[in-house]
Amino acid sequence: MIFTYRYCMMLEEGSFRGRRADFVYMFLLGGILMVLCGIFVQMVFLGQAFTIMLVYVWSRRNPHIQMNFFGVLSFTAPYLPWVLLLFSLLLGNNAIVDFMGIACGHFYFFLEDVFPYQQHGTRLLVTPNWLKWLFDERQAEPVPEDERPGGFGWGVENE
């Protein structure tokens, strides 16, 4: 839970700042991919895979951040999902869950951050307008001064 909270917060305040709809869209795509992958590998509980997906996206978007694992291992952020996978294997957990999270995170990262910037690349993951309408802040349109209600006519002389 702490990993999920921490990396959600860092993604939301970092690369998704001011783009709530895009953040929700990543969650939806990740959830759909997890469920589809979960059907094929016959897994029901996908929370750990979802957390690894968030960690993967964050780590790829912050490649220069130095990480430290239990004070023993020092590495840059893109290696964090792989270090977590190794740690999970050392604890005797199923590696398929972590691989699924890494694969789903890579799928999102590649289509959002890599492919659109390649030669002849296009942006395939476009957040639907209804999500933007639901989650993004609406820009207030300024009202012309002569139409603003209230206030006083300071400096205006009465005739």
Image: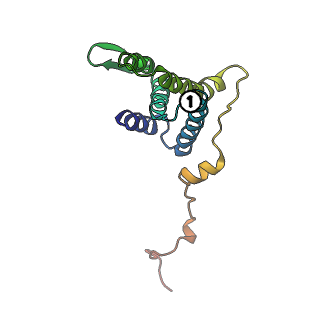
Q: Mark 1 falls on what kind of element?
A: loop
Q: Residues within 10 Å of mark 1 (few under 14, many from 20)?
A: few
Quadrant in which residue 128 is drawn: top right
Question: Which residue does the numbered mark 1 point to in the structure image?
Answer: 42
**How many marks are shown on the rendered structure?**
1
Quadrant in which residue 39 is drawn: top right
Q: Is residue 134 above or below residue 72?
A: below
**In-front residue for pair 153/156:** 153
Quadrant in which residue 83 is drawn: top left
| Residue 56 shown left or right of residue 28 in the figure | left
Residue 140 spot, x, y in % from top left:
55, 58
Residue 54 spot, x, y in % from top left:
47, 31
**In-front residue for pair 131/147:** 131
Q: Is residue 131 above or below residue 59?
A: below
Residue 154 spot, x, y in % from top left:
43, 74
| Residue 34 shown left or right of residue 154 in the figure | right
**In-front residue for pair 16/97:** 97
Residue with the most extreme front position: 42
Q: Is residue 68 above or below residue 16?
A: above
Q: Residue at x 44, y 76 (%)?
A: 152
User: Which amino acid type is shown beneath numbered disc 1?
Assistant: Gln
Q: Residue at x 67, y 20 (%)?
A: 118
Q: Residue at x 65, y 34 (%)?
A: 125
